Image: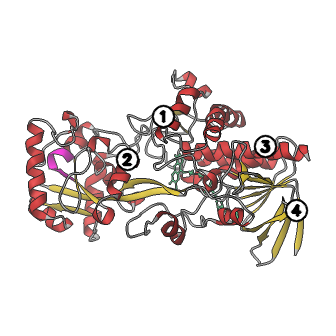
Amino acid sequence: MKQLSADIGIIAAGPAGLAAAVAAAETGAKIVVFEKSSVTGGCGNMAMGPFAVESRLQKKQIVGLTRDEAFKMHMEFNHWIPDASLVRAFIDKSGDTIDWLEGMGVKFVLAARHFTTSQPTWHVLATGAGAHGTAAEIFKVLTMKAKELGVKFYFQTPAQKILKEGGNIVGFQAEERSGEMVQVNTRAVIVATGGFGGDTKWIKKYTGYEWGSDLFSFKIPGLEGDGIKMAWEVGAAKTHMMLELYCSVPNQAEFWNIDALFRQPNLLVNLNGERFFNEEVMQNNTFAGNAVSRQKNRCAFMIFDENIKNHYAKNGFDQICYDVPVNDACGFDAEMQRAVDSESKDFFMADTLEALGEKAGIHLPSFMETVADYNRACESRDALFNKNYKFMKPISAPRFYAGRLVPSGFGSLGGIRINYKCEVIDKSFNVIPGLYAAGTDANAIHSDSYTFIMPGNSMGFAINSGRIAGEHAAEYLASL
Ligand SMILES: Cc1cc2nc3c(=O)[nH]c(=O)nc-3n(C[C@H](O)[C@H](O)[C@H](O)COP(=O)(O)OP(=O)(O)OC[C@H]3O[C@@H](n4cnc5c(N)ncnc54)[C@H](O)[C@@H]3O)c2cc1C
């Protein structure tokens, strides 16, 4: 087997792995990064921005949210279930990390909210229609910096096994494209392989969802729980594992404009034709995802009429799904026609409510009763869920529209237990010397729902935990 040596070996070059590589290389350590795909950046290449508080940018925008407040908010939202020291370390580091990235040349333009009632913690690089994926720039810059600092990258060379000798981590083995194995001898290893969001078997086993049937999350190729499995094999303790769940129309990426209209605070019914949610909470997509997941066949239908559609085209949306608008109400008709022409099983149009309910397969008598009740409530108040009156728009003007909403998500969360230094912890709560984990593989800082009220925090956690892991791994080397 080929042999190779370095101080620290990093498994994967996504946001967490790259941040770890640069942070460790800044101390002068010799770093190698082994990546399964042919590029750096991982899912970060599709993202818009990371979480931070007390960054220079936020201060410039006179955002008052402090680290103390963000910490309290995060812990209370998650009922103090996550490791408080880890959450604190991540939040405390986050503002400085934005400055660190800006120092390398990353140009953030806005500390944004994701939706109206969320906090302005989302540090985005661009706003407007082309904003999706602009975070890729962060990872280009980190890659360049890493190379400048002497970091060596090995692509299409997935790590397969972490090596442990006498209780200490001493490297890992990876497979080259040719099929030949390479042994990487190091004094510390950082695992950052992005979780299991691309593996339907793991999703079923650890979350209970059946991808393509009752879950339509981004299924990013290559994210197959590799790092989690390798860390477990050398004794890492397990954390709870979940999805970064939200709700959307199926195949959201093909139908952004449709998706935005079907996420406005209009009538939402389940297959039984009943309301089950205060639709003004739709903008908190994670909450909507939780509620939809509890319904029959884990789906629900958003209903509106021609008046409502025209209202959005003329006046804009009731609620924004993004503080940095990327959707266009005027683009709805064309997308909807495309969907209906392709005999979509998710989007329906009809000239009567009866026909709409029938096409969508909603229990008709109950649906008709619910619409009648809802329309009456629009004239007085929503006695059922007390939805804000300004969002109570009757469903009465043909044409009528229905869109199926389903559980979706960005990826997985959790797997490897770490402490606030991102050291991997075993089942007896002891540190495994030389083993670190960061990013999605170790992101167990949410209890039952992704903390969407402070947006950007999954990539924020990835970059910050990566940076923390890199710094502490370098410190560990110095202590040997
Ligand atoms: C469409 C989309 C939009 C998003 N937008 C945002 C956003 O705006 N803000 C936000 O906070 N979060 C966002 N996220 C989530 C964010 O991208 C992730 O939280 C972040 O990328 C996680 O970083 P990571 O390094 O842990 O893992 P990943 O980015 O998943 O990277 C993991 C890397 O590991 C590699 N790998 C896997 N197995 C191996 C192996 N055996 N050996 C070597 N390498 C391996 C993979 O190829 C990949 O490069 C978004 C996600 C998606 C899918």
**As drawn, 331 above or below 387:** below
Residues under labels 2 and 1: Cα distance?
20 Å
Disc 4 residue type (three-letter): Gly
Picture residue at 50% right of the left edge, 66% below the top? 203
Give, as a single range, the part of the protein colored magenta: 303-309
Disc nearer the start of the sequence (3/2): 2
Residue named by callout 4: 166
Query: Does label 2 point to a residue whose CB lies under 8 Å from ligand 1?
Result: no
Disc 3 is placed on an element classified as: helix
Q: Which one is in front in this view, the residue at disc 4 or the one at disc 2? A: 4
Residue 256 in sight here: no
Residue 112: mark in rendering = 1
3 or 1: mark nearer the eye = 3
Where disc 1 sits, the SS reads strand
Residue at numbered disc 2: 287
The amino acid sitting under disc 3 is His
Dot 3 or dot 1: first in sequence order is: 1
Residue positioned 37% across, 52% down in the render: 290
User: In the rendered view of the protein, which quadrant contains the N terminus?
Assistant: bottom right
Q: Earlier in the sequence, mark 2 or mark 1?
A: 1
